[in-house]
Amino acid sequence: MLGPVLDEVAGENVGKVKVAKVDVDQNRTLAQQYGIRGIPTMIFFKGGEEKESLVGAAAKGKIQERIDALL
């Protein structure tokens, strides 16, 4: 459900951000490492450091706002 939205956001922010998707069923260790309890969860990093996260489906505009705030 969120995949197409993230694809759009990634396409509109080429060269500014990297967008990665992780299947937490296939990567349980990573999910535990970041304390992911709800799906979908988006984690925003800056300089390799976790800055904030969003749990649940979010509108494209809300995701872009979070990206803009971190740039």
Image (cartoon, rainbow, N blue to C red):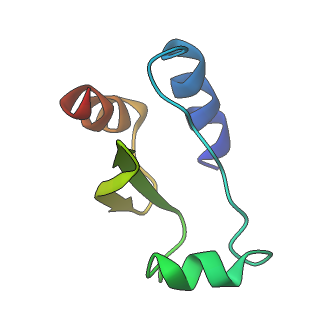
Name the residue at 32% across, 32% down: 67
Instruction: Where is residue 29? Give x, y as percent.
Output: 65, 84
Left or right of 37, for residue 44: left
Q: Nearer the viewer, residue 58 or 17?
A: 17
Instruction: Where is residue 13? Give x, y as percent.
Output: 48, 17
Name the residue at 44% across, 82% down: 35
Q: Nearer the viewer, residue 60 or 54?
A: 54
Relative to residue 11, is residue 21 depicted above or below? below
List the single residue furthest toward the left: 69
List the single residue furthest toward the right: 26
Instruction: Where is residue 70? Give x, y as percent.
Output: 24, 34
Name the residue at 66% across, 51% down: 21
Quadrant occupied by the C terminus: top left
Which of the 4 image quarters holds residue 22? bottom right
Left or right of 2, for residue 60: left
Relative to residue 35, is residue 2 depicted above or below? above
Q: Nearer the viewer, residue 33 or 9?
A: 33
Left or right of 70, for residue 59: right
Instruction: Where is residue 30? Give x, y as percent.
Output: 61, 75
Left or right of 8, for residue 64: left
Which of the 4 image quarters holds residue 47? top left
Q: How many marks?
A: 0
